[in-house]
Amino acid sequence: MMNYVKSLGTYNTRNMEKESSKDLVQNEDTPLPVQKISMSLFHEIVFVFIACTAQLMTQAGLGQSIAPNNIIGKSLGTTNPGQLSWFPASYSLTVGTFILIAGRLGDIYGHKKMFVLGYIWFCIWSLISGFSYYAKSVIMFDVCRALTGIAPAFLLPNALALLGRVYPPGKKKNLIFALFGATAPNGFLLGSVFSGIFAQLSWWPWTYWTTAIVCIVFAIIGYFAIPHIEADEVEEKQKFDYLGAFFGVSGLVLINFSWNQGPVVGWQVPYVYILLIIGFLSLVVFVLVEKRVVQPILAPSMMNSEMGCVLICVAAGWACFGIWMYYLWQFLENLRFATPLLVTAQLTPVGISGCAAALTTGYLLKRLKPTKIMVVSMIAFTVGTILIATAPIHQTYWAQTFVSIIVTPWGMDMSFPAATLMLSDFVPKQHQGIAASLVSTVVNYSISIGLGIAGTVETHLNHKGVDLIRGYRSAWYMGTGFGGLGVCVAILTVFASYLKVGQQKSPKFPLIMKNTKAV
């Protein structure tokens, strides 16, 4: 697959050299050259660091929703599993839903502006999330976390687009994208550590107030460290698709809300399935709108079968990961009676394993096709979930639990950079924000909706909360199913790439005879 992408890039580069500047403006499928930015080594290090903080803070925000989950729930007056799962789900919902729009806005108004504004928004709603303690309302806290999730939606695609615009395809870009992916497990671990410390030893609102301070610092650093990238003539003529944005966001929000609200109030409640139907209808309208507008949010011309298969793998794998992580935390706290800090300590190998996986992925990307790397990542997601799903309650941590914690990060850090690099190198440069958005959208939206589906399974099989282990294992088995789906699609993608190469190499005798006859 990587050879296919590289050959396609070479083909487009040759075509671009032949086209005039006028044709370049008119043809949005022609890639724009990477802008050469002059930076000192220190400036470049700071730039890459601040770009990687987008992924770091996104996953830290998720960790802040999971680690102190039970403590926050008790302070707000709830122990309902369905309501507790909304804490991380509401955050991931808006992260995944608004990424496409944020990437498009970055393409139009500038990725640096959207990046800095994202951190300012993150700061504001982290402050309000902490103050929601005084409201004593679960709904208030969920709304604050959902609005906080809009900030990472602006950070992720625009950070990736900035990296994509500054660095051309090559070893350096592969390494930087691998580092970007490595911040995911470490970001989650960092968020879990500090939120666990504040929740268990001090006061949980300080988790979010400290985050607000960090975010405003990162906003200032980003303003000075991110280089100025001149807008291309194509970008200056772009317009925002407000109608498509409305139907796209509405559809994604309603579908996700229905899946996560179903376990709380029950699927027999009319508004749950009515909103689900309206959500699917909104997405149908979104597709129709995108086919007709001149400058869509998600151009249909960008999509092809290879990209579709990659995104399906990412969706299945990260839905599996979300289920694995959330119910692992509940399992360790509620059935092994570990404190939040002890659980965080037990999850420390996630960061080490994640770094090893990221470095290995950067090495493998030079030698293997991304489709093969995707197969390995899906296997890691699946195996990690199976290990914890079958672990006995009183088994030592160093048996299946430890191995599961070591294996699963390889799925995270192999799938994300592989998928991101493929899409970043494939689409035109003026669509870098959209390309980056696709992977990040699927990652975060899948975590949220995966939790909703697993929550439905759990509540129907845990005998009304009496048999917790049965509910947790049923949710993990659901996650295993997602992982297995990812493995199957990834393997099919590998076979499809081999068939495509074989067809390109095979002689086309009928075509030769036809051309000869014509001569």
Image (spheres, rainbow, N blue to C red):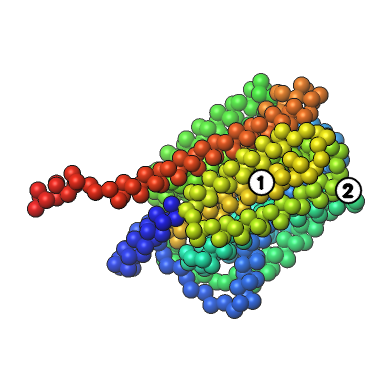
Amino acid type assigned to the residue bearing label 1 in the image: Thr
Q: Mark 2 points at which residue?
A: 200
Query: Horizontal and vertical percent for residue 518?
Result: 10, 49
Inter-mark Cα distance, 2 to 1: 27 Å
Measured along the vertical axis of the image, is residue 447 above or below residue 433?
A: above
Amino acid type assigned to the residue bearing label 2 in the image: Gln
- Left or right? Give the position of 503 relative to 261: left
Given residues 71 and 412, the one toward you in this image is: 412
Measured along the vertical axis of the image, is residue 500 above or below residue 50?
A: above
**Which type of secondary structure does the marked residue at label 1 adopt?**
helix
Q: Residues within 10 Å of mark 1 (few under 14, many from 20)?
A: many
Which callout, 2 or 1, points at the residue further toward the start of the chain?
Answer: 2
Q: Residues within 10 Å of mark 2 (few under 14, many from 20)?
A: some
Q: Which residue is drawn at 59% across and 38% down?
A: 483
Of all residues shown, which one is farthest toward the right?
Answer: 201
Query: Horizontal and vertical percent for residue 415?
Result: 57, 50
Query: Horizontal and vertical percent for residue 324?
Result: 69, 40
Q: Residue 408 — which label? A: 1
Q: Residue 304 — which label? A: none
